[in-house]
Image (cartoon, rainbow, N blue to C red):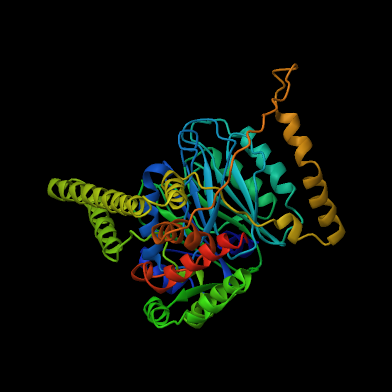
């Protein structure tokens, strides 16, 4: 009996270790097999999102999911985007420091929902049909955990049919081996009832383990805790061996601009001037340009791990933050060292100011570069202010087993668009009469175009809408001359 009890006490559901963030790449393989999650208490996503980006770069791991807790979403509703990731934020946020944000790779089929959880924020993520990952933030202000425990118990009961259950986040309950937290035993016993056990009991906040990774799985798993000085919480990582569903690899088309400029300068448009039909001349002009562009275009397949999260993160930033974290480690070992304390604070402030400066300079250059293009300017403004709308994959339609149900769902939505919009409009004037505009007969004239107008069209509209790249040095040469002749010919014979 004693042997059985000792075996139970020594049972571990996952490997766990403390390491430097740079060691992640050696412990967590960068392969398509496995679900890799990084969790961090960020204490205001608006303030510290710039610090999480170099953290990701330093790890060298292509994280499938990044969970941020204590995001202060009520005061920062607009969430910053990450290149190569979609994001989902909790909406049931009551106090100012609440909020959970999940960033998940946009080349994965992942669905996210927000279940109701009493006295906590929760997002449920489904990376595959047999797995659910619950990202939770429970504020420390709730002393009585009965409501939270009962609500979490009901939520886990609804996940009983799933083979793999992951619970992670900042729960603010200390589960260290020698914990004195009175809520620890209640919390762990309830999880054990559902077959969920701690993946680690390593301290993540001072000497307490508040950032949890709980598992119910038969798959191999690894949990890592690594020190960062981004906030007063350490980062936690999880890798579980499961096969995720990937979208087709993204293909990027790149144009060889110098070769295209050379081919355009040597292109002969003499045949275009001999054509008597405006439609035939237009088709010849477009086909000639498209042939040259296709000839000078190559397709490159890029994986998400090779895409830059943010262009302003220079190679020196991760090294700078590594030195900051090393100073913080030394300070924790020798907290009474005044010289070390001053050195660390100065270097920490230097890193923070450097990140802000690089980000501001990059955003300024983006605004100046889009100054003459209103469409591009608004796109940059939305990126800077984090108001750009996300294009989510319609997983409800893709994953359904009944195609007829999907078709009926789409038809029903679009058939009721007008009705839904009309119901949202408040009828403030019941005696509204439409105003009939009187026609004003006048003449209409098409004036000959010039090369300056063509230049403006190319730079601000044609090139942007059709994604056609034309070198600036050729705006006033062969291409513009051919377009001027083509437009004038069309106007002359009234073919528009």
Relative to the observer, which residue lies in front, 264 or 427? 264
Question: Left or right: 401 with respect to 14?
Answer: right
In percent of width and height, residue 102 lies at 54, 51
Question: Left or right: 250 with respect to 59?
Answer: right
Relative to the observer, which residue lies in front, 195 or 459? 459
Question: Left or right: 426 with respect to 88?
Answer: right
Q: Quadrant of residue 401?
A: bottom right
From the viewer's perspective, is residue 257 above or below residue 95? Answer: below
Q: Quadrant of residue 128?
A: bottom right
* Visible residue check, residue 178: no
In percent of the image, x 16 and y 46: which residue is there? Answer: 342
* Visible residue check, residue 8: yes
Question: Left or right: 32 with respect to 435?
Answer: left
In percent of the image, x 76 and y 36: which residue is there? Answer: 420
Q: Residue furthest left?
A: 339
Relative to the observer, which residue lies in front, 434 or 54? 434
In percent of the image, x 54 and y 80: which residue is there? Answer: 291
Q: Quadrant of residue 418?
A: top right
The number of discs equals 0
From the viewer's perspective, is residue 427 above or below residue 324? Answer: above
In percent of width and height, residue 227 lies at 36, 56
Q: Quadrant of the N terminus?
A: bottom right
In percent of the image, x 47 and y 79: which residue is there? Answer: 269
In percent of width and height, residue 464 lies at 49, 60
From the viewer's perspective, is residue 367 above or below residue 38? Answer: above
In percent of width and height, residue 293 lies at 49, 77
Relative to the observer, which residue lies in front, 435 or 137? 435
Q: Quadrant of the C terminus?
A: bottom right
């Amino acid at each position: 009996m004693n042997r059985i009890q000792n075996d139970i006490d020594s049972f571990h559901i996952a490997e766990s270790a403390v390491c430097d963030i740079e060691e992640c790449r050696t412990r967590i393989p960068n392969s398509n097999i496995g679900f890799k999650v990084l969790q961090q208490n960020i204490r205001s996503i608006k303030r510290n999102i710039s610090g999480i980006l170099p953290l990701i770069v330093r790890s060298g791991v292509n994280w499938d999911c990044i969970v941020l807790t204590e995001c202060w979403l009520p005061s920062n509703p607009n969430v910053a985007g990450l290149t190569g990731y979609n994001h989902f934020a909790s909406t049931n946020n009551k106090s100012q420091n609440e909020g959970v944000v999940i960033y998940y790779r946009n080349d994965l089929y992942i669905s996210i929902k927000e279940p109701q959880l009493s006295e906590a924020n929760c997002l449920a993520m489904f990376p595959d049909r047999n797995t659910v990952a619950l990202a939770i933030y429970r504020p420390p202000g709730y002393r009585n955990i009965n409501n939270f425990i009962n609500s979490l118990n009901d939520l886990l009961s609804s996940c009983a049919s799933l083979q793999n259950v992951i619970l992670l986040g900042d729960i603010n309950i200390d589960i260290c081996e020698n914990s004195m937290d009175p809520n620890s035993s209640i919390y762990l016993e309830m999880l054990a009832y559902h077959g969920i056990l701690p993946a680690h009991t390593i301290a993540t906040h001072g000497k307490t383990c508040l950032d949890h990774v709980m598992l119910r799985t038969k798959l191999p798993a690894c949990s890592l805790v690594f020190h960062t000085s981004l906030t007063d919480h350490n980062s936690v990582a999880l890798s579980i061996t499961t096969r995720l569903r990937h979208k087709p690899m993204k293909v990027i088309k790149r144009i060889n601009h110098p070769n295209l400029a050379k081919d355009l300068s040597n292109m002969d448009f003499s045949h275009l001037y001999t054509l008597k039909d405006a439609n035939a001349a237009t088709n010849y002009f477009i086909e000639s340009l498209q042939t040259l562009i296709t000839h000078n275009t190559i397709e490159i397949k890029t994986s998400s791990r090779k895409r830059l999260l943010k262009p302003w993160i220079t190679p020196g930033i991760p090294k700078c933050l590594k030195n900051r974290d090393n100073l913080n480690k030394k300070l924790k070992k020798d907290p009474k060292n005044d010289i070390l304390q001053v050195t660390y604070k100065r270097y920490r402030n230097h890193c923070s100011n450097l990140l802000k400066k690089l980000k501001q300079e990059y955003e300024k250059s983006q605004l100046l570069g889009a100054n003459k293009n209103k469409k591009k300017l608004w796109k940059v403004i939305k990126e800077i202010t984090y108001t750009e709308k996300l294009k989510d994959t319609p997983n409800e339609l893709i994953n359904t087993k009944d195609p007829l149900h999907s078709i009926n769902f789409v038809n029903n939505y679009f058939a009721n668009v007008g009705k839904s919009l009309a119901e949202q409009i408040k009828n403030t004037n019941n005696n509204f009469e439409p105003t009939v505009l009187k026609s004003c007969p006048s003449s209409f004239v098409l004036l000959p175009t010039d090369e300056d107008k063509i230049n403006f069209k190319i730079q601000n509209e044609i090139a942007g809408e059709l994604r056609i790249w034309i070198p600036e040095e050729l705006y006033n040469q062969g291409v513009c001359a051919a377009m001027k002749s083509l437009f004038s010919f069309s106007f002359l014979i009234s073919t528009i």
